[in-house]
Image (cartoon, helix red, strand yellow):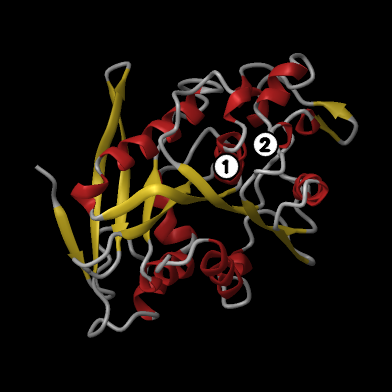
Amino acid sequence: MKKCFAVTAVITAVGFTNALAAQSDPSQTSYQIEKNITFKRIDNKDIKLDLYLPKANTDTKSPLLVWVHGGAWKRGSKDAIPNKNPLLLRSVLEAGYALASVDYRLSGEASFPAPVQDINDAINFLNQHANDYNIKADELVMMGRSAGGHLAGFIGATNAAYDKVDFYTHPNYKVDAVVSFFGPTDLLAMGTKNGKKVGPRSSVSMFLGSAPTDNPELAKQASSTSYINAHSPAYIQLHGDEDKRVPLSQSEHLKALLDQYGVDNELYVEQGVGHSARIFDSEKYVPTVMAFLKKHFPVNQ
């Protein structure tokens, strides 16, 4: 039986931070959160998602955003979004979107393409159960930060180039847009750092199962940049110019390809900040992301 929690802005037990609570009016705002929904079981382990639902509206189904957490592909969980992106979470819920935050197998458990398979299976599951949750999941937006930005962008890119993909089951959904906060896009380029080859224990090597330069074809297969075409979804990317973990060139490379194919895209570069800077979940950038969502994936479409 599903358990549904009514959450006001003054309740933080399910993971909302004080930052989220302080910016909400408990007399006006109420959300539902479906916690720990098992969408697949593999190797005797349940893989789960959380579904954040906007204020109940029985007349229309809520459009779906899918959030993929960061953590260098080796750590982190679906539970991070209320702490990492509280303003964005509140903003999308108040706008009428539903948001699914998904777990996936980390690199200590399995390498590429396992995480991609998990995310695809999560979305297919939500599509199959859309009526149960009163969501619209045949079209959606992928979102994520850092490694999650890579996975979100990868799902978006391959969704529009599925003829080149044979490593996850057929998606029963269409990705309309991608929101990526400082996500990698070209994993072969991530195989060198300061002119030196990264080792087998690096984050990207653990994700791939080998160092990118040792298996360049695999690194290309796991890169969003390998799949961009004229039918790719719209992208918005946000990045710090002093990011040492994921160089700005990663977002710039993807933007160049999107521009080449005439795909609508935006890149916002914050000067003087590194990886995972808090400013990206602030009034400086969240309204920009919301405007992008409303343009490419409006609530009342």
Would residue 76 be found to the left or right of residue 47 on screen? right
Are dots 1 and 2 in contact, CB under 8 Å? yes
For disc 1, the neighbor class at 10 Å (few under 14, some 14 to 19, many from 20) is many
At x 13% / y 46%, what residue is drawn?
A: 2
At x 60% / y 25%, what residue is drawn?
A: 163
Residue at the farthest right position: 195
Q: Position of residue 154 (x, y in %)?
A: 60, 37
For the residue marked with disc 1, what is the amino acid?
A: Gly
Q: Position of residue 244 (x, y in %)?
A: 76, 47
Residue identifier under label 1:
156
242 is higher (above) or lower (below) than 8: above
Residue 18 seen from this side? no
Would residue 154 be found to the left or right of residue 109 on screen? right
For disc 2, the neighbor class at 10 Å (few under 14, some 14 to 19, many from 20) is many
Q: Name the element at disc 2.
A: helix
At x 63% / y 23%, what residue is drawn?
A: 164
Residue at the farthest left position: 1
Q: Name the element at disc 1.
A: helix
Q: Residue 205, located in which quarter of the rendered image?
A: top right
Sooner in the amino-acid sequence: mark 1 or mark 2:
1
Position of the N terminus, as image quadrant, is: top left
Residue identifier under label 2:
224
Q: Residue 55, located in which quarter of the rendered image?
A: bottom left
Pick the front one: 155 or 19: 155
Q: Position of residue 161 (x, y in %)?
A: 62, 32
Q: Residue 28, located in which quarter of the rendered image?
A: bottom left
186 is higher (above) or lower (below) than 55: above
At x 22% / y 49%, what residue is drawn?
A: 131
Q: CA distance from mark 1 to mark 2?
A: 8 Å
For the residue marked with disc 2, what is the amino acid?
A: Ser
Pick the front one: 7 or 134: 134
Position of the C terminus, as image quadrant, is: bottom left
